[in-house]
Amino acid sequence: MLQQTASPKRWDTRRQEKRERMARLGLTGKVLPSGEVPAMLEKLIAPGDRVVLEGNNQKQADFLARMLAQTDPGKLHDLHMIMPSVSLPEHLDLFEKGIARKIDFSYSGAQSLRMSQLLEDGLLEVGAIHTYIELYSRLFVDLIPNVALVAAYKADRNGNLYTGPSTEDTPAIAEATAFKNGIVIAQVNELVENEADLPRVDIPGSWVDFVVVADKPFFIEPLFTRDPRLIKPVHILMAMMAIKGIYAKHQVQSLNHGIGFNTAAIELLLPTYGERLGLKGKICKNWTLNPHPTLIPAIETGWVETVHCFGGELGMEDYIAARPDVFFTGMDGSMRSNRAFCQMAGQYAVDMFIGSTLQVDGAANSSTVTKGRVSGFGGAPNMGHDPHGRRHATPAWLDMMEGNDPLERGKKLVVQMVETYQSGSSPTFVENLDAVEVAKESGMPLAPVMIYGDDVTHVLTEEGIAYLYRAKSLKERKDMVAAVAGITEVGMAAKPDTVKRLRQENKIAFPEDLGIARTEAKRSLLAAGSIAELVEWSGGLYNPPSRFRSW
Amino acid sequence: MLQQTASPKRWDTRRQEKRERMARLGLTGKVLPSGEVPAMLEKLIAPGDRVVLEGNNQKQADFLARMLAQTDPGKLHDLHMIMPSVSLPEHLDLFEKGIARKIDFSYSGAQSLRMSQLLEDGLLEVGAIHTYIELYSRLFVDLIPNVALVAAYKADRNGNLYTGPSTEDTPAIAEATAFKNGIVIAQVNELVENEADLPRVDIPGSWVDFVVVADKPFFIEPLFTRDPRLIKPVHILMAMMAIKGIYAKHQVQSLNHGIGFNTAAIELLLPTYGERLGLKGKICKNWTLNPHPTLIPAIETGWVETVHCFGGELGMEDYIAARPDVFFTGMDGSMRSNRAFCQMAGQYAVDMFIGSTLQVDGAANSSTVTKGRVSGFGGAPNMGHDPHGRRHATPAWLDMMEGNDPLERGKKLVVQMVETYQSGSSPTFVENLDAVEVAKESGMPLAPVMIYGDDVTHVLTEEGIAYLYRAKSLKERKDMVAAVAGITEVGMAAKPDTVKRLRQENKIAFPEDLGIARTEAKRSLLAAGSIAELVEWSGGLYNPPSRFRSW
């Protein structure tokens, strides 16, 4: 039943709109004059547009953010911002000034308090809080951008971009925008004449409409640098338990580490404690990880075969360039990171995710959201769950099977590694996550849970390890969590008989069950005790930011 | 404890190896002479290498596959092939000749029978069977390639590639190889002098080592073209149930459709039956989908806002280029597909996956593997599960919540749409999947299940819909499956009283419960009844391959 022939509808409204906006500039070529950016943005962006502003927990398109905040809210208003990370004061100025109204984002660190305030004041409307990869995905489906504001180290006059070690989110954002007739604008630290003057091309000029030289190099946060001086014996104890009771026990060969002193301690124990246990070449070979400086000793001693990175890390550039067998580097010798692919790999290709959190409830649900802070998830929920689309088997993955069903499958290891108390006196283990209350108060459709308890396979505290994948029921899962929750309210509910039985059944393990003496957990076990020693390990190639230099 | 300083180890063995291999060719520039490819491959590849050979269910690097199969097994042997799809006879010749030994792959359609035979004969060893996106992920972790053999439409002499509508897997494969000092070789249909002669750049020349002009254009399979003539009334009945009982009921706004006449029928009913139900603008707005020709009428009548594509579809190029508001197209006007991003979007950004399968067991586990065939999964398990890392809410996703737990989350809709019997007399619903037996026989660590029952939210047959997300127990899930499994062994076990109760509780629905008369399900309801009518709908822009032309 043919009801009608092809309609006379216009099918290129976005392309036409883009042409008109670009024509308004009256510019020849792709280079925007740096001094006129707010006025130019007022012509290239329209009220109500979806605008992706690049910035994650590392690099920031900060110049373009500042320029956008200087536009006239009379001309530019009600923008729907899509921002992997809300990190800079300018980001929220946009809302305070009325330039922007709605936001979809993944992470807000330093700005989480002010964001809550703007939300309460009705100046900001949250679309949703996402994981990084989930947010990029929506750029191709129901959050297609009109404009993308991105950052690169260098560009040539044809718009070819060199993003190098900090490639990060740029390919995903640029692709979704460029191929849906959106406008792609890149701030760059340096403009060169020709492609031959670029170290390499990361983003082809065919995808980029404008480049503009920023007033200063884009901001990068060295978020993944942890000073070994701040690693305490308790971290070392927990790291020893992790290595012996989880990594070695399950043969964890590929993995992701989150930020934190816990995992930094593990990295620094591999060449010492791990070596002594004879584990080199058996565990921790392939990593999806930001280039943690604390991984240097493990790399230098041959533990680490490969590392694929979400982003770069300030000061690690030369070291990485000198270790191309380990890191992903280009023809020019510098690294290429890629957050979308690294998150994809962290979801689908690794045996284990291990991370920390602020609150864990009795069923092992966790969240970093606490009252008055809308902080977001970053990448943790993406890597901290068992992807049911995975079909390849590894020893660690298979080791999570407990039953005899012929259709049973393995599981990703999702480890929560937390001290029972946060610094200060707030307990990590709580009866109810603050997230539940926060959701009610802010009218969110769901409580902002970071990692759900049914995805957690292990909880590791200074008290011991709970092997949650072995729990036969929700009740038993709760008993196991309580057994390692120390003197928190959750932990004090543990019954001695139950704890005894769980130990006998190898469902929980205390340090002594693993043959680890608490007295062994000394700082002298660390392969490096300071940033200076990391520099030494690197043969002088690691060049830490000045705030980490104490010499 | 600083144990040693930076070791004198070599850290650029891969880079050095690459340089040496490339130097062996004695070639200036990036263009390989087309007549000497096997000899060149013998110099660029070494025994035991991991080689990614591009090819999925659409485009194939078939020239390079043929050339590789012509190399001397005395020089080139024991290769570890990584192939998204095993589609061509040459792919398996590699194993028969001893050039390759191990394979990691995602899909094998036409070659699945021969593959089983080679496996049995000990000539081929399977690493694992993956989903597409899972396989790409491992390229960055534990399956890093030494060499990538890819396909593009055009290249310039600097190695810049135009992959256009068939960009597909190339970016993921090229990136993993190029940035780990692997060698990237692209076969192209046409070589041009300069970048300015390319429509646009999809892959920068900085990532590509060699290009070679193929003897004929790369092969593309028009896998997603379904002739409306072959749509039967039973497909139309099921499509009506899907639209009314699932799409409208849950407000499914973003979705993926698999291959098949069932979903083709849904696409062709939107402008007729869907229109009559007043659903336009309310459902089926944003798609992650190959450019199905059967979607043309829905696009022309304004149902479809956007489509992001895994790959291209032969004959759809001009139509797509003329509909840039709907499809993702570049500055040059042609489409860019991207399988990695589209799979990512299909996993994380859409409300629903709907697909078909060959066998379903009583608990709704399904597989396309049958005895004697190692067929693989493609993308279905990736999109056909609930990603626990998703945190944004949509009406359909929230509608899957059944309980009152404040920590409950929504779910992706995963719909299995199958007739109770396959053509011929084999039942779709079976007591035990063949996959279980196949796994035992071939020594696989796990049964090759396509979609696990606990991820399936709906089973839809010509009998009715089972709303499995509402099942309170595995027992009830099985009762619900049985209630719609017709006169198969599984279906005949259904008890009338239970079926009655399930209908009353709205856990299953028969057509009459949805207000659908079986007599309504007529071919005249289809917006197009033939390929010719699809061409007409497209205003002559759709140019079907000759095998689909009957006029």
Image (cartoon, coloured by chain):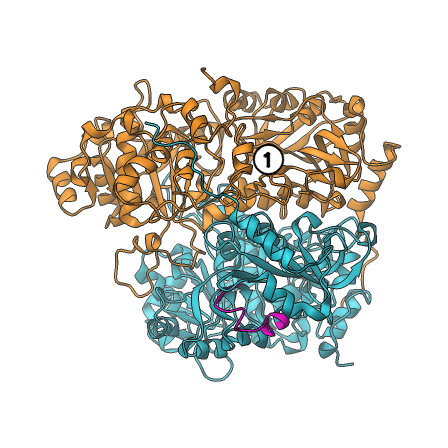
Chain colours: A orange, B cyan
x and y, in percent, of residue B519 in the image? 58, 75
Tell me which amino acid carries mark 1: Ser
Dividing the image into 4 quarters, which one contains the C terminus of chain B?
bottom right
x and y, in percent, of residue B550 in the image? 75, 81
Depicted B287 relative to depicted B118: above or below: above
Residue A125 shows in this picture: yes
The answer to whether A166 appears left or right of B120 in the picture is right
Q: Residue furthest bottom?
A: B424
- Chain letter, disc 1 residue: A
Most foreground residue, B218 or A421: B218
Q: Residue at x 47, y 30 (%)?
A: A539
Segment tinted magenta in the rendering: B66-82
Q: Give the quadrant of residue A229.
A: top left
Q: Residue at x 15, y 42 (%)?
A: A503
Dividing the image into 4 quarters, which one contains the N terminus of chain B?
top left
x and y, in percent, of residue B284 in the image? 62, 55
Count of residue discs: 1
x and y, in percent, of residue A252 in the image? 34, 48
Q: Tag 1's secondary structure? A: helix
Depicted A247 relative to depicted A230: above or below: below
Residue B77 lies in the magenta stretch: yes
Q: Give the quadrant of residue B291.
A: bottom right
- Give the residue pinned by disc 1: A166
Most foreground residue, B241 or B530: B530
Determine crowd level at label 1: few under 14, some 14-19, many 20+ residues with C-alpha closer than 10 A.
Answer: many
Residue A507 lies in the magenta stretch: no
Most foreground residue, B405 or B35: B35
Depicted A170 relative to depicted B109: above or below: above
Q: Residue at x 45, y 15 (%)?
A: A551
